[in-house]
């Protein structure tokens, strides 16, 4: 959630920043927030004045009663009744304005950094790095949805029988490959100084709000009505919410956590050839890295996450590119985001497999996550997260890019985790 002080002090810059995110009602919505805030201050001042007047009269009544001026004291009491009625009315107005202010504020997305490129579509994202050479496959190479049938390692039909489309069943070496990737990603993060967390995979509304998933992504999350809980879209949500309503010690920052969870997304929309097989799922596995930092350290932390994801892809031998997302393609919560895509040689297209985002104080303000600074005051932290990594499209690319006439070759870095070198 944006800070009102920033909207007030940097109004024009905030409007232009939101317009970069293709938020077309930026000026009107910021004006509404500031207007409600001014009205709230006015009502608060009137309440304070009414209370002060009531206290003044109460003191006068006490003095009149001591002096035996009972009739004058009773007349003053009538004024206090009127003031109590006024105070009650003002309190109701104040609470209504607070509710209106909340509703107006939560609609506003995070402000993108100045480094974010202009643009409204994914085609306007900027490629900042491309690494590796796509493999040259034989003429009989096939996409992963054919490979998984050939080697009987993932079963979509069985998943559809059990749960529905988008819930695959991993079998044999397919299941072992999943487990190998999860452990590989976790170990690499732990070696990089992240502390492993195993969080719940269901969250309450307060947690969804804290990271900005609610109300923005309400329709994309699986909701359990009877329990008023949501299935997590990513481990970022429960891990970051560990620090909700917490005042951290400056010496404990940065905090670096990693967690593996299954993730659940309704993914409403088209289901065509471009999202076939593992390209889009309702349930998938992911390892997530999260950092909580002082504001001055956030840029370095963000770059360290980018470098970490690069390292993972290079160890897996996957050709990749990094895109800096344009304003119109960024998430509601992010201030700057880099997407990672791997090249699928069989599909002849780039597949998004990860993103690394910094949120400035946007999530921290919702979470009320602060640290005590050198000045002794409480300040909002910066939050960051990255996928390190999401498995489905990584698996798709590994299967496709490493297919040979003898079978699918497992990358060297994964062999200690799989216990086998080939899927054949």
Image: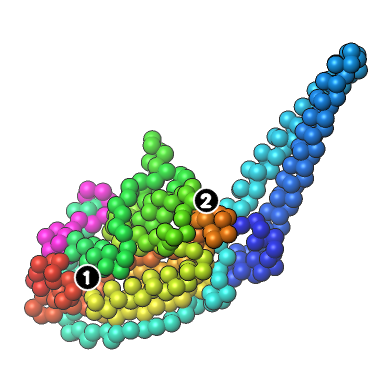
Q: Is residue 122 above or below residue 284?
A: below
Indicate whether residue 171 is drawn in magenta: yes
Which comes sooner in the sequence, label 1 or label 2?
1
Residue drawn where x is 46% and y is 76% of the image: 324
Indicate whether residue 378 is drawn in magenta: no
Nearer to us in this view, 311 or 291:
291
Q: Position of residue 84 (x, y in %)?
A: 77, 27
Tell me the quadrant of the picture where the N terminus can be found: bottom right
Q: Is residue 107 left or right of residue 319?
A: right
Q: Position of residue 149 (x, y in %)?
A: 15, 65
Tell me the quadrant of the picture where the C terminus can be found: bottom left
What is the quadrant of residue 310 in the picture? Answer: bottom left
> What SS does tag 1 mark?
helix
Q: Is residue 302 above or below residue 29?
A: below
Label 1 to label 2, Cα distance in Å? 44 Å
Circle 1 or circle 2, nearest the eye: 2
Packing grade of label 2 (10 A; few <14, some 14-19, many >=20) is: some
Q: Is residue 247 visible?
A: yes
Residue drawn where x is 10% and y is 73% of the image: 421
User: Which residue is tagged 1?
Assistant: 144
Q: Position of residue 279 (x, y in %)?
A: 31, 66
Residue drawn where x is 8% and y is 78% of the image: 406
Bounds of the magenta span? 161-178
Packing grade of label 1 (10 A; few <14, some 14-19, many >=20) is: many
Nearer to us in this view, 257 or 35:
257
User: Which residue is tagged 2?
Assistant: 368
Q: Position of residue 366 (x, y in %)?
A: 53, 52
Residue drawn where x is 72% and y is 38% of the image: 93
Label ID, residue 356: none
> What SS does tag 2 mark?
loop
């Amino acid at each position: 959630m944006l800070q009102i002080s920033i909207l007030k002090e940097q109004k024009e810059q905030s409007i232009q920043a939101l317009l970069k995110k293709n938020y077309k009602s930026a000026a009107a919505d910021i004006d509404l927030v500031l207007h409600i805030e001014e009205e709230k201050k006015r009502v608060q001042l009137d309440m304070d004045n009414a209370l002060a007047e009531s206290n003044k009269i109460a003191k006068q009544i006490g003095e009149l009663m001591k002096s035996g001026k009972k009739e004058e004291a009773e007349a003053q009491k009538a004024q206090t009744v009127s003031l109590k009625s006024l105070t009650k009315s003002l309190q109701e107005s104040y609470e209504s304005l607070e509710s209106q202010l909340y509703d107006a504020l939560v609609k506003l997305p995070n402000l993108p950094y100045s480094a974010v490129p202009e643009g409204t579509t994914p085609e306007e994202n900027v490629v900042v790095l491309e690494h590796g050479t796509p493999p040259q496959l034989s003429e009989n190479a096939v996409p992963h949805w054919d490979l998984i049938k050939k080697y009987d390692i993932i079963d979509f039909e069985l998943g559809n029988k059990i749960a529905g489309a988008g819930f695959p069943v991993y079998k044999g070496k397919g299941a072992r490959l999943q487990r190998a990737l999860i452990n590989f990603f976790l170990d690499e993060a732990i070696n990089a100084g992240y502390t492993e967390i195993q969080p719940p995979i269901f969250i309450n509304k307060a947690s969804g709000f804290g990271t900005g998933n609610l109300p923005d992504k309400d329709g994309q999350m699986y909701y359990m009505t009877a329990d008023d809980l949501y299935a997590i879209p990513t481990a970022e949500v429960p891990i970051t919410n560990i620090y909700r309503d917490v005042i951290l010690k400056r010496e404990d920052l940065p905090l670096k956590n990693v967690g593996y969870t299954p993730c659940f997304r309704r993914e409403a929309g088209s289901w065509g050839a471009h999202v076939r097989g593992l390209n889009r799922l309702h349930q998938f596995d992911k390892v997530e890295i999260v950092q909580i930092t002082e504001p001055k350290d956030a840029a370095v932390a963000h770059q360290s996450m980018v470098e970490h994801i690069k390292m993972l892809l290079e160890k897996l031998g996957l050709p990749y590119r990094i895109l800096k997302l344009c304003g119109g393609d960024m998430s509601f919560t992010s201030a700057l985001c880099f997407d990672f895509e791997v090249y699928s040689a069989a599909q002849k297209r780039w597949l998004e497999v990860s993103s690394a985002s910094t949120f400035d104080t946007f999530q921290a303000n919702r979470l009320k996550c602060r640290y005590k600074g050198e000045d002794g005051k409480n300040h909002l932290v910066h939050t960051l997260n990255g996928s390190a990594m999401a498995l489905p499209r990584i698996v798709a690319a590994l299967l496709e890019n490493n297919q040979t006439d003898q079978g699918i070759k497992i990358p060297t870095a994964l062999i200690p985790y799989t216990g086998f070198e080939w899927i054949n």
